[in-house]
Image (cartoon, grey):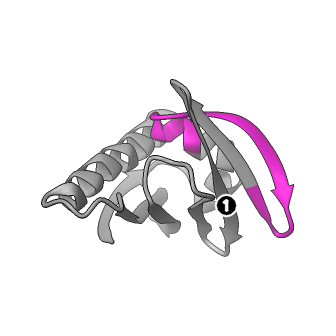
Amino acid sequence: MREVSVSRFVRATTEELQRELTPARIVQYEGSFDATSVEPDGDGTIVTAEKRGLSFQLRFEPQENGFYYTQVGEMGPFEEMETWLTMKRKDDGSVVTVRSAVDLGIPLPGTGRFAAWKRKGELKRLLDRLADDH
């Protein structure tokens, strides 16, 4: 699996971000898919994400300072994907870091690099949209 990570300063406290950020909003901020349903799942949340005929699920688990989420089931844009979103207070806001590990599951040269490039774009878009809202 290939890992990518992006960070951004956001003019909101970690407490504000923890109240505002929901699993569905994170999916929307990433921008590649629409969150079409949200269901509780024990101590986590299952979000169904859809776009152009592709539907898959993500399982979100709240963490002390953010979220951990992973693609579940056999359908999805990646064979495997897991992501950690963390927030740390800094000055009059927070530094939000999103780290993700992805694998397309295709044994061809360059596919790992492509999957990481695609995922990094989604993570940058998530943080840009989050920052724009603050």
Q: Is residue 26 above or below residue 50?
A: below
Residue displayed at 42% across by 46% down = 127
Q: Position of residue 26 (x, y in %)?
A: 57, 46
Who's the residue at 39% across and 50% down the image? Answer: 123
* Residue drawn at (70%, 67%) of the image: 62
Residue labelled with disc 1? 60
> On the rendered structure, is 19 left or right of 80?
right
**Residue 108 spot, x, y in % from top left:** 18, 59
Horizontally, residue 51 falls left or right of residue 124, namely: right
- Which residue is the extreme one toward the bottom? 64
Is residue 32 highlighted in magenta? yes
Instruction: Estimate the x, y position of residue 4 in percent, counting from the top left.
Output: 30, 64
Give the amino acid type for the residue marked by disc 1 in the picture. Phe
Q: Is residue 134 visible?
A: no
The residue positioned farthest toward the front in the image shown: 107
Range covered by the magenta-colored residues: 27-45
Instruction: Verify whether residue 68 appears in magenta.
Output: no
Q: Against 66, is 64 above or below?
A: below
